[in-house]
Amino acid sequence: MPMDEATQQSKGFMFIEFATSEMAHLAVRAANGYRMDKSHILVASHFDEIGKYKDVPDKFEPPADKPFVVKDHMKAWLTDPHARDQWAIIKGDEVSIWVNNKSQRPDLLHSRPRWTDFYVQWSPLGTYLTTFHPQGVAIWGGPGMNMMGRFLHHDVKYIDYSPNEKYACTWSWNPFRTPDGQEHHIIVWDILANRQLRTFAAPQAEEGKANPWPIFKWSHDDKYLARVSEDKGGVIQIYETPHMGLLDKKSIPVANVRCVEWSPSENMIAYWAPGYGSAPTGVTLMRIPDRQIIRTKNLHQVLDITLHWQDQGDFLLAKVIRNKTKKSQQSSLELFRCKEKNIPNETIEFPVNVVLTNVAWEPNGGSRFVVLTQPEAMTIVTHFYQMENIEEQKAKSSKHVAKSATSNADMSNICWSPRGRFCLIAATKAFTGTIEFWDTEDDLLLTTEAHDMHTDLAWDPTGRYVVSGVSYWRVQNDNGFTLWTFSGEVLVRQQNVPQFKQLAWRPRPKSLLSDAEKARIRKHLKDYTKEFEEYDLAISSKADREVVERRLALLAEWREYRARTLESYNKNKPQRISLLGIDPDVEAKKAVLQVEEVEEILEDTEEIYES
Amino acid sequence: MLPILLRGQERPLTKIKYNREGDLLFSASKDKLANVWYSHNGERIGTFDGHNGTIWDLDVDYHSKRLLTASGDGCCFLWEVMTGKNLFKWDMVVPVLSVAWAMGDQQALIVTDSRMGRKSSIHIVKIAEDSTQQTADAELIIAIPDDMSKVTIATWGDLNAFIVAGHENGTISIWDPVTGALIESVTNHTGRVQDLQMSKDKTFFVTASKDNTAHIYDSATRKHLKTFKTDRPVNSASPSPIRNHLVIGGGQDAMGVTTTSARQGKFEARIFHLVFEEEIARIKGHFGPINTLAFHPEGRGFASGGEDGYIRLHHFDPSYFKFKYDGESLRNTDGR
């Protein structure tokens, strides 16, 4: 450091020139804040920042208080007097939000051209609409659908909200460079503060495979987020919000761990790790944050496992594929009752080489699940299972209730009503577009319908309506959607919407009513339905009247037009007759069927009858 | 009633037309033949054999004596309906796309394609009463200017006061048949005009277009009156002479058909309400796009000709004539 000749002490500063700006950046990061001793700290900054420091006033002035701004009512859409639901739709470049009016014309709320550059996504409680842009995502909400935040993340492709909408996690295929030179794909955000919390690197998917998403799994209370990592032979990393540090500053070592899933109702994770050598494969339940293993189930010769939680966390289902012999595979389902003591487990075995194509739990705390199996090519069997009370049936607690076989190998999609009970089994993204409407309470196939080539199925948040759509992103003709009731009745058929791309129902938060209150409403349902039926009747008769009035007006207009044109037509009659030689109008009336009888004698012979 | 299936053509139908009384049905096809049928039972009476290319259009005169056919072989033929004898032949060199008798059967128009450096044009020829006196010279040739796309179909207006033509780009143009001047042109369609049919009294006309719609225009003012939307290219549209109905047919392009099932091709004939622009009924049957449709001149039924080579002859059930649409009274107060 240069010395002050007068005081024989260092001047306390110096300038260093580096060959490249990267070197300068590194030096600043390394030297800034370095403690030389107890009372001396080194400060390093870039030369071009000096101007910034020069302008700092010597006297502290407290910042002025910001005036209070009334924020938008974020739950305004729930105050609709008839509790109608909304959907967002993308048609061409235009994003619009509509209110569902059943079979009547929906009401348009907002419509903006080029609102999003890719697709739209609602936050899990329906508060925000997310739009995707090359610069990042924007979220919109409130009665006027104003911008509620912007998260800059170049070429962002996915967003994953925490269940309570406090945080969100975004992923971009295009990594950005962190100050220390690493390439990161993931950013975790605080939504209300509009702030970046932490960024992460993400493993790249293999060539030709879709990137796994979500990579981070949120716990039900937004407190933790977990992921599996291949570091050190396999670890589960759990980060704590909002500071985004590792839980207890260390990750959980689990060799070869493949996937982790949070219980939807408590801070418990389920994960599985394939065995190696003589070690068996294990499905494990672990409590967080104390990291206590509650249950482990060991399995052998496992090829793959997928974990499915029931949405209240009562049951966990593990779909297991095992090697039976070298050439044959066997699938089974492992069921865990997570709310019961010792977490009892049971197994449903399927015959060898029967492929389980899909499994889905009944939502809204239901105890049923649907399994689609493919025993042979071109056949899909739908199985309905019901979890029964363990006291009632000691030996076996899951009951196979119904089975239906179809010879349609396209049936791949299980789409449960969000309120449970009703379930669609559909050939989504397939040619036939068959949709089966099931009532699982009575194991009844309500009806089988079809929406050709449909690419999407979406239930409204109340489970009363379902929309099937043909998206322009996948199929380039017949784009449009059909609105069905839960029982398969068509309410609206809009099968010719050019460039229809997406229809997303706005979710609703959980009901604030307690179970007792809900039971009371169910008991007095008749009193309530009366009110709603009257309203429905009023709406539909009004609509009918409008249609008839419109038609009468059109008809009157047409008759007036016809009378006018016929007048000039009749005026030209002499000319017409001279041109054609006959009057076409008179002649047409005169035309009568003439019956001509022709008798032709072919042969005439006479025979004398002898008596 | 079950339709009568006429299997007399080996290749896709291009045009079918009833004669004035509706007892005969004429059909043209890509198999180079034109046929004539009894419309009430579908019996074939005869074949007009002589063309050497697809017959794109035909027209029969007012008294069902003579038939004009337009063919891709560059010729336009005049036939005697009764005998099937070829009376005259115009050699236009380039494909002939459309042909139409003028009212009174003294004149006809012939639409030629723009090929081999020739402009798309409408030729107006005089038709001699005695066909031995017939000459090949045109009275007037309307050459379509370069800034307009080519004419695909044309027909005469009431009292031969004008000629209305449909163009490749969807334009509808009106021409003076005496001077050959362009009176007016309107562009509402965004796709090729496939068909153009006059109402029975010629007070309005219906156009069918590849842009999935059919339109109605007023003949006198050329005002656009109605639009009928479907989800497939419309190849033909024909108005009912007695009710406010319009039959529309079309379907997925022939090119895309091999990859779609009949259900997705939407090969149904659809009946629309002419005033309300709403679909009333669909009639299934063809397994290829419908290329041409004709309403029976007395409104008793309609015929459709498809890419599949079949003609389907529909006769309405009695219930059709009693059928009443909401908001519509059955009385024929518009005088038709």
Image: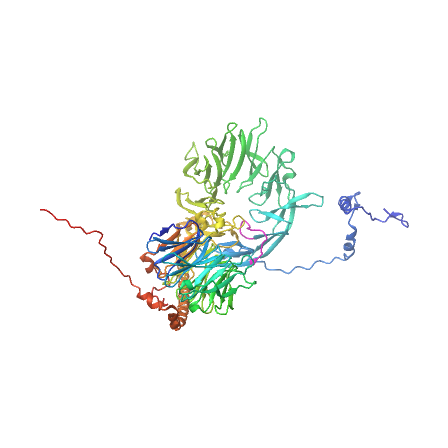
Residue A125 covered by magenta stretch: yes
Residue A551 appears in which quarter of the rendering? bottom left
Name the dominant secondary structure of the magenta segment: loop
Residue sitting nearer the eye, A61 or B196 = B196
In the image, residue A531 above or below residue A404: below
The colour scheme of the drawn protein is rainbow
In the image, residue A418 above or below residue B198: above
Residue sitting nearer the eye, B94 or B292 = B94
Q: Residue furthest right?
A: A6
Position in image of residue A372 (x %, y %): 46, 38
Q: Read off the magenta span.
A: A112-128
Residue sitting nearer the eye, A272 or B114 = B114
Q: Residue furthest front?
A: B132
Residue B173 covered by magenta stretch: no
Position in image of residue A115 (x %, y %): 58, 56
Position in image of residue B270 (x %, y %): 41, 56
Observer able to see residue B33: yes
Q: In the drawing, does residue A429 fall left or right of residue A28?
A: left
Position in image of residue A146 (x %, y %): 58, 58
Residue sitting nearer the eye, B36 or A519 = B36
